[in-house]
Image (spheres, grey):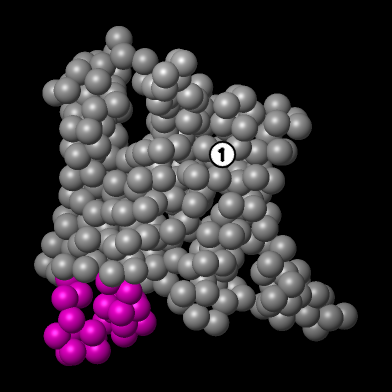
Amino acid sequence: MPFIVSVAVLAVTTALTCALPGTLLVLRRQSMLVEAMSHAVLPGIVVGAIISGSTRSPLMVVAASLMGLVVVLGAERLRASGLVTGDADQGLIFPALFAIGVLLLSTTLSQVHISEDTVLTGDLNLMALTPEHILVANGSIDLGPRMMWRLAAVFAITAAYIALCYPTLKISTFDPVSARTLGLPVRRTDLGLMTLVAITVVVAFDAAGAILVVALMTIPPATALLVSRSLFGAILMSLGIAAASALLGFWVALRWDLATSSTMAVVDALVFLVVLGVTAPRRGLAARAGEQGASHS
């Protein structure tokens, strides 16, 4: 598979995998929890790499995902204790975990090729250079980037989980009190969703990094929610926006020699602003500025 095609396919797969659970997170007002998890998984990645001796081991995925869940469960406990207010529960946990990961990365794994810059923004182009092959009689067939298949597997598992638990997820998203009153397994279902979000963050970490994965997971769903009238429609629309923005971001990055994942995030933001301006002119920043100017004149 040509390198340009590999990057484009990997960009779309990364965007789709991140955007799939994003609609539920945005509706639940848990978008910033993704940022906390994306930073907290770093020590899990480092510890998993130390134990397994590889940065591609399944053990690393498990360790990093568990570290992401530490943020969710730890923040929940702190919030339930009543000792902290607002979103300070997350702010108390993930900066410390991220700092521990950076310290381990710069000491214990100083000889391993893990760049601090890649930790923040990822390197999608580099991931596209590692193809997956299948052996045939006359040689091997290039199936595309190995990272693409890992993300595709996570996408399939997440899609299956959302489809299986859709009624519970839908009710608990819009009315968690009623969901608990009906005896639905809200806590177990939410924990499963958060586990899949943590796995998504970990698997997409090399391609999108700790910061850009937040944009890929929240901006397309936020854009879709501006125009969609149903949860299912918002999920489908967020996937369409994510794929289109990924392809456009890839083309812009290729045309002007920019970082692919960063450009994808910028295009996502621009698309959101355009849709916001078109669908909500009276609530847009430009309209508000115009109204203020008219009132002063």
Q: In the rendering, at what x and y percent does residue 78 appear?
A: 16, 61
Q: In the rendering, at what x and y percent does residue 30 appear?
A: 36, 64
Query: What SS does tag 1 mark?
Result: helix
Q: Is residue 125 magenta?
A: no
- Amino acid type at circle 1 is Val
Residue at (72% x, 69% y) in the render: 277
- Magenta span: helix, strand or loop, mainly? helix
Q: Which residues are magenta?
A: 165-187
Residue 174 in the image: above or below residue 266 = below
Q: In the picture, residue 161 is in which quadrant? A: bottom left
Residue 286 in the image: above or below residue 104 = below
Q: In the rendering, at what x and y percent does residue 76 appear?
A: 18, 63
Residue 71 in the image: above or below residue 206 = below
Q: In the picture, residue 184 is in which quadrant? A: bottom left
Crowd band around label 1 with a 10 angstrom C-alpha radius: few (<14), some (14–19), many (20+): many
Residue 244 shows in the view: yes
> Which quarter of the rendering shows the N terminus?
top right
In this rendering, position of residue 140 left or right of residue 172: right
Front-most of 61 and 38?
A: 61
Q: Which residue is mark 1?
A: 9
Q: In the picture, residue 258 is in which quadrant? A: top right
Residue at (20% x, 75% y) in the render: 186
Residue 255 in the image: above or below residue 68 = above
Residue 97 shows in the view: no
Residue at (70% x, 27% y) in the render: 257
